[in-house]
Image (spheres, helix red, strand yellow):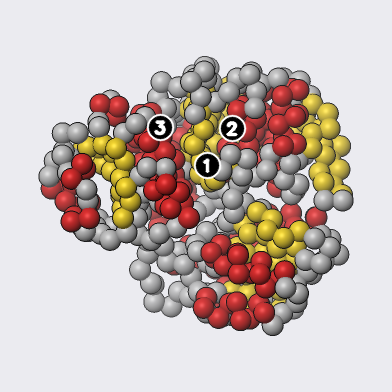
């Protein structure tokens, strides 16, 4: 099927970060684009400004007539949508062509050279960084990203000169199995989405199958010491990377005065004195992977060095909102125990003599049930923790699964608080902070402007 033959494209879950990149893609192709999302957001507001027809009530009556012709309309949906969704059922019952977001992305990128970044965590920053390196070089690229690039204010980059496309390869619902990578990075394989996979072994099996999809004339760049055993095609090259060792690694790392420099060691040529545009320790690993992709795609060492220093990051990934002599405040999307641990350790490296506090909003009942002890272990690396209610996203409550499970397992000596989301700002007004982080993939980031007001008035 050629998606370009459709006049209209309708998205169920249009405001999702991955879905919105496709909304923007089809708008760029002059299609009539519309859709439904559960709640308004800054992102849906921008999509409407860009030309999308989006509404927030699940009702067939809300769907514009342009999108009710099965012969000319493609329906794209996110797996997070429940099966009894009214609009979804209407399209199924009336013979529309319906595809998952990942299927459409797989089709659109099938004839391109896919530069894919997969992994439990690190994939959004690494893929956005790789896209920035290629976009700022003679190679150029297209990119479908899982976050809003702060350099470009969007999650979609387009080029009519390049056959490379950077893709965040999402393992949720086995979405990445629709991709045909030319080069792929795998950043991490810490078990997640056990509501989908059931066991850690099945999760790893999904990544193993993903490696078999990489082109035989392409390459896998895999972080060292992962439990994953790749199953690549004959001819596919395998490289390793990490901060300390591997085919690609860092040497002469210098962290201080809010800056990070290191030398990039590579089988394709070393680059001295790389400066991280977003100077947090975990971005050394992310940067090594992104530079490996760029080098292997033909970006010059000079282009790589210049672009690394100008990378501004991704919204909600180590997103510094306030950074002055009095207080530091940042928002981070970390929502898995391993991510949270890396986030905290990165902040410890930058602010060794400061008290580090965090507000954590757990994401999903199933993830809390499966990992509450691991969450408590990671959060116990902080000096102070404020935990609010679980953000349910697509899930119904599970009896006995609340934020209290994490709270009760925090290590002795950690200053800790539990509060309702609506009580958070009142609690923050009563406290003094040196370094404050909001952690979570839910709606905790909506509080960032109010938190900035509170801290700036001190």
For label 1, the crowd category at 10 Å Cα-Cα, with few meaning under 14, some 14 to 19 and many 20 or more, is some
Identify which residue, 193 or 159, lies in the foreground: 159
Where disc 1 sits, the SS reads strand
Nearer to us: label 3 or label 2? 3
Please report the residue visible at 86 percent of the width from the left and 43 percent of the height from the top: 254
Please report the residue visible at 63 percent of the width from the left and 37 percent of the height from the top: 129
- Name the quadrant containing residue 8: top left
State the image coordinates of residue 61 (x, y, percent, origin top left): 18, 56
Where disc 2 sits, the SS reads helix
Q: Is residue 405 above or below residue 166?
A: below
State the image coordinates of residue 291 (x, y, percent, origin top left): 68, 30
Q: CA distance from mark 3 to mark 2?
A: 19 Å
Whether residue 199 appears in this view of the structure is no
Nearer to us: label 1 or label 2? 1
Report if the CB atoms under discs 1 and 3 are less than 8 Å apart. Answer: no
Identify which residue, 129 or 72, lies in the foreground: 72
Q: CA distance from mark 1 to mark 3?
A: 13 Å
Q: Which residue matches tag 2? A: 131
Identify which residue, 196 or 277, lies in the foreground: 277
State the image coordinates of residue 281 (x, y, percent, origin top left): 75, 48
Q: Is residue 234 above or below residue 347?
A: above
For label 2, the crowd category at 10 Å Cα-Cα, with few meaning under 14, some 14 to 19 and many 20 or more, is many
| Quadrant where the image shows the N terminus | top left
Q: Which residue matches tag 1? A: 154
The disc placed on residue 298 is: none
- The earlier-in-sequence mark between 1 and 3 is 3
User: In screen coordinates, is 361 left or right of 451?
Assistant: left
Q: Which residue matches tag 3? A: 28
Report if the CB atoms under discs 1 and 2 are less than 8 Å apart. Answer: no
Q: Is residue 66 above or below residue 79?
A: above
| Quadrant where the image shows the C terminus | bottom right
């Amino acid at each position: 099927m050629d998606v370009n033959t459709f006049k209209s494209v309708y998205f169920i879950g249009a405001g999702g970060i991955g879905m919105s990149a496709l909304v923007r893609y089809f708008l760029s192709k002059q299609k009539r684009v519309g859709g439904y999302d559960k709640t308004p957001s800054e992102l849906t507001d921008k999509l409407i400004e860009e030309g999308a027809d989006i509404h927030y009530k699940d009702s067939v009556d809300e769907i514009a007539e342009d999108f009710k012709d099965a012969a000319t309309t493609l329906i794209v949906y996110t797996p997070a949508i429940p099966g009894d969704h009214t609009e979804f059922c209407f399209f199924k019952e009336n013979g529309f062509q319906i595809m998952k977001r990942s299927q459409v992305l797989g089709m659109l990128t099938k004839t391109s050279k896919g530069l894919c970044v997969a992994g439990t965590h690190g994939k959004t920053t690494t893929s956005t960084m790789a896209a920035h390196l290629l976009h700022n070089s003679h190679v150029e690229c297209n990119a479908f990203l899982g976050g809003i690039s702060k350099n470009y204010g969007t999650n979609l980059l387009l080029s009519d000169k390049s056959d490379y496309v950077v893709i965040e390869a999402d393992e949720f619902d086995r979405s990445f199995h629709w991709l045909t990578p030319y080069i792929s990075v795998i950043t991490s394989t810490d078990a997640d989405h056990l509501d989908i996979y059931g066991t850690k072994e099945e999760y790893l099996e999904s990544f193993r199958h993903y490696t078999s999809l990489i082109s035989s004339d392409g390459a896998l760049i895999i972080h060292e010491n992962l439990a994953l055993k790749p199953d690549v095609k004959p001819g596919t090259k395998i490289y390793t990377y990490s901060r300390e060792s591997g085919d690609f690694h860092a040497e002469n790392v210098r962290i201080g005065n809010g800056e990070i420099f290191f030398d990039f060691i590579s089988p394709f040529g070393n680059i001295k004195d790389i400066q991280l545009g977003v100077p947090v320790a975990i971005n050394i690993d992310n940067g090594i992977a992104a530079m490996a992709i760029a080098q292997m795609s033909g970006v010059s060492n000079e282009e790589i060095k210049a672009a690394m220093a100008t990378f501004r990051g991704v919204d909600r990934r180590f997103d510094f909102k306030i950074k002055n002599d009095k207080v530091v405040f940042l928002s981070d999307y970390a929502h898995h125990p391993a991510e949270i641990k890396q986030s905290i350790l990165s902040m410890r490296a930058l602010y060794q003599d400061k008290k580090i506090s965090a507000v954590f909003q757990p994401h999903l009942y199933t993830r809390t049930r499966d990992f509450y002890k691991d969450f408590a272990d990671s959060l116990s690396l902080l000096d102070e923790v404020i935990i609010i209610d679980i953000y349910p996203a697509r899930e119904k409550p599970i009896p006995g699964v609340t934020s209290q499970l994490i709270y009760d397992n925090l290590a002795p000596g950690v200053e800790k608080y539990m509060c309702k989301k609506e009580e958070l700002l009142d609690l923050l007004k009563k406290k003094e902070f040196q370094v404050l982080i909001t952690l979570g993939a839910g709606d905790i980031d909506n509080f960032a402007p109010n938190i900035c007001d509170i801290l700036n008035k001190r």
